[in-house]
Image: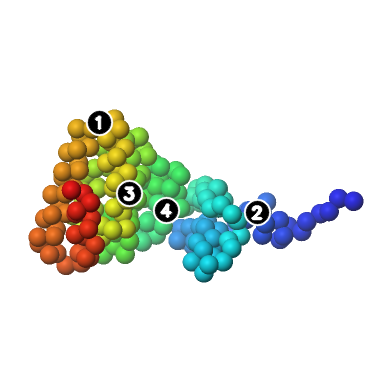
Amino acid sequence: MKLLWPLCVLTFLTGQSSLDPPAFTKPSEAYQFARQPLTEWEAALRAHKQPATKTLPGNIVEERGKALCPRFSLDTVSGEELYWLAKLCEANYPKALLAVQRYLQGQKLEHGPDARVLLAVLQMRTTGNWEASWATIQNILKEDPIEPVYSQIDVAVDDEASTAPEKALGWSDERYAILLDRTKADMKGVSPSLTSCMLRAG
């Protein structure tokens, strides 16, 4: 006899459902839903518990994002919701790039540093190289908290070194000079970890 699993059980086991995703009025709500499996997975690890799956549920998050992204138009989203639209549509590089660019044109940005990192990544994905992102990375080095994004900047420099070592060396020198200037200026908001990052850059 073939066992038929209830839909609710199948959804729990797979993280997916044959039903359409719920209706959302804001990209932030849609993104929260799309990322929920990953959020719960990370929370389980922090609590030293066994996650629902052995591996990151990134495929579920990506599929949810792809399904929900077309529900929101760039022309109908504004303010902080533009940032969440960019996050939701991250797999759709052109749309996400436009969303984060429009977001960064605003004032008093709640997610400014994160948005600039996202901009740099999307610029790279759209063009296929980090050179298009370097001006954005320079702004990040000059203005934003460094420690959370330093490993990403390392990736950019290392990737460039594999094809253009001289240019990568120039980027590394620029990075060190910018961080040194920030340290000397003792700018407001600079964390103690900045000195460590500067030493690593050198």
The residue lying at 20 percent from left, 34 percent from top is 167
Q: CA distance from mark 4 to mark 1?
A: 30 Å
SS of the residue under disc 2: helix
Q: CA distance from mark 2 to mark 3?
A: 31 Å
Q: CA distance from mark 1 to mark 2?
A: 43 Å
Q: Which residue is mark 3?
A: 152
SS of the residue under disc 3: helix
Q: CA distance from mark 3 to mark 4?
A: 17 Å
Q: Residues within 10 Å of mark 3 (few under 14, many from 20)?
A: some
Are circles 4 and 1 on residues that touch, CB within 8 Å?
Answer: no
The residue lying at 53 percent from left, 67 percent from top is 48
Identify the image quadrant of residue 17. bottom right
The outermost residue toward the left is 184
The residue lying at 30 percent from left, 32 percent from top is 162
Q: Which residue is mark 1?
A: 164
How far from the left and from the top, in percent, is residue 96?
Answer: 39, 47
